[in-house]
Image: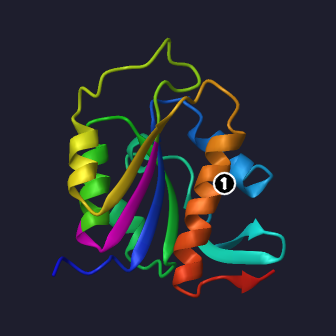
Amino acid sequence: MGPAMPNRLLVGVLGHQHSGKSYTWNMLFGSEVRRGKYARHLELRPHECVEVFLVSGSFEERQEYAGDILKNQNSRIVLCSLQYHDEVYDTLDYLVDNDFFLYIQWLNPGRTDPGQYWDRLGLANYILTAQSALTMRNGAIDARSRVQEIREFIYGWALYRNLIVPC
C-alpha cells in the first residue's frame, strides 16, 4: 500500500520572471488579482466555487519563506507563482513536507523567453519524485487553453473532496 494522498493541493505556475505567471491568475479569476491575506472564492463553473488562497508574486521574487505565509493558512487549495530560480527548492520542500499534492504548470518558454530552455536546475525530476503532476506549456501563446486546464484540474480535485460550494 502506497502513501496516503496529500490533503492539500498546490496549483503552481512555474517560470522565469515575466513568463506569464501573474497573467495566468488574472485570467483564471477573470480580473486582475493580487496576493491577499485571506482565502477567496474561485468560480470554476457557473455558480460553483471553491475556496483558494492565492500567492501571486512568487516567494522567490519577494525573498520570502513559504512557511511564513502558509503556516497559518487553512485553505485546502493554494495557487502559487513559482520563480524558476535555485531558491524555488525551499518553497517546494515546504510544500512537500506539509502534505501538498503538487500540480505544476511550467511555462517553458515563458512569455518573454527567446525559446524553450533546458531544466538546468533539475526541477522536473525533483517535482516528479513528489506526489505531483507536472505539465509544460508555452507561455508565449494564448493562455486560454492552459488556464482552462488548471480550472478543470482544480474542479476534479475539489469535487472528489466535496469542496465545491455555491457562489
Image quarter hosting the N terminus? bottom left
| Callout 1 crowding tier (Cα within 10 Å): few <14, some 14–19, many ≥20 | few
State the SS at label 1.
loop
Q: Nearer the viewer, residue 109 or 39?
A: 109
Above or below for 131 versus 26? below
Query: Seen in the image, is 166 located left or right of residue 106?
Result: right
Q: Nearer the viewer, residue 90 or 143?
A: 143
Residue drawn at point x = 27 percent, y = 65 percent? 96
The residue that mark 1 highlights is 34
Query: Seen in the image, is 35 located left or right of residue 142?
Result: left
Confirm whether the magenta stretch covers residue 82.
no
Identify the magenta region. Answer: 97-105
- Looking at the picture, how far across and down is residue 145, in whole percent? 67, 42
Q: Amino acid at mark 1?
A: Arg
Instruction: Examine the image and state in which quarter residue 35 appears.
Output: bottom right
Number of labels in the image equals 1
Q: Is residue 53 visible?
A: no
Above or below for 17 versus 44? above
Residue drawn at point x = 53 percent, y = 81 percent? 160
Query: Seen in the image, is 105 located left or right of residue 97?
Result: right
Image quarter hosting the C terminus? bottom right
Question: Farthest left residue?
Answer: 1
Instruction: Examine the image and state in which quarter residue 10 appears.
Output: bottom left
Above or below for 4 versus 107? below
- Looking at the picture, how far across and down is residue 114, in whole percent? 50, 11
- Looking at the picture, how far across and down is residue 156, in whole percent? 57, 71
Residue drawn at point x = 83 percent, y = 77 percent? 47
Question: Farthest top residue?
Answer: 114
Q: Is residue 63 visible?
A: yes
Confirm whether the magenta stretch covers residue 99.
yes
- Looking at the picture, how far across and down is residue 117, in whole percent? 37, 20
